[in-house]
Image (cartoon, rainbow, N blue to C red):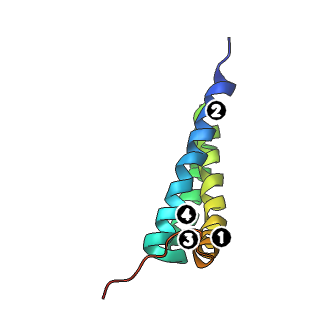
Amino acid sequence: MNFSGIIIGVATFLIIGFFHPIVIKSEYYFGVKCWWVFALMGVATLVASLLVQNIILSTLLAVWGASSFWSIGELFEQRKRVEKGWFPKREKKD
């Protein structure tokens, strides 16, 4: 039996699920100015996926990279959701 597909599917599900709260917390604490962190992480993991020989690891690095790039857009969407009142806005303490 070949479990590669199931491993990739489950890990992809977990990676995407992992990014959801990261985007919410990042926007809450840093706003959208941290988008470049997601961009750097995306580039680094996509390059790493090209260099890794193991197909499962290479695929998961690519999923991580794509999720990082997708998170940039979600970061800006999260700002809109906060403005609509769907998520709490962080009160800045002086």
Q: Which residue is mark 4?
A: 38
Q: Say which residue appears at 43% left-offset and 76% top-offset.
A: 90
CA gap, disc 2 and disc 1? 27 Å
CA gap, disc 3 and disc 1? 12 Å
CA gap, disc 3 and disc 2? 26 Å
CA gap, disc 2 and disc 4? 22 Å
Q: Are marks 3 and 4 in contact (CB under 8 Å)?
A: yes
CA gap, disc 3 and disc 4? 5 Å
Q: Which residue is mark 1?
A: 77
Q: Position of residue 1 (x, y in %)?
A: 68, 11
Q: Give, as a three-letter code, the residue at label 4.
A: Phe
Looking at the image, tell me whether mark 2 or mark 1 is earlier in sequence order. Answer: 2
Against 13, residue 72 (above or below) is below
CA gap, disc 1 and disc 4? 15 Å
Looking at the image, tell me whether mark 3 or mark 1 is earlier in sequence order. Answer: 3
Q: Give, as a three-letter code, the residue at label 2.
A: Ile
Q: Position of residue 73 (x, y in %)?
A: 66, 67
Q: Are marks 3 and 2 in contact (CB under 8 Å)?
A: no
Q: Which mark is residue 49?
A: none
Q: Residues within 10 Å of mark 3 (few under 14, many from 20)?
A: many
Query: Which of 23 and 6 lies nearest the eye of the viewer?
Result: 23
Secondary structure beneath label 1: helix
Q: Give, as a three-letter code, the residue at label 3.
A: Trp
Q: Which residue is mark 3?
A: 35
Q: Give, as a three-letter code, the residue at label 1.
A: Glu
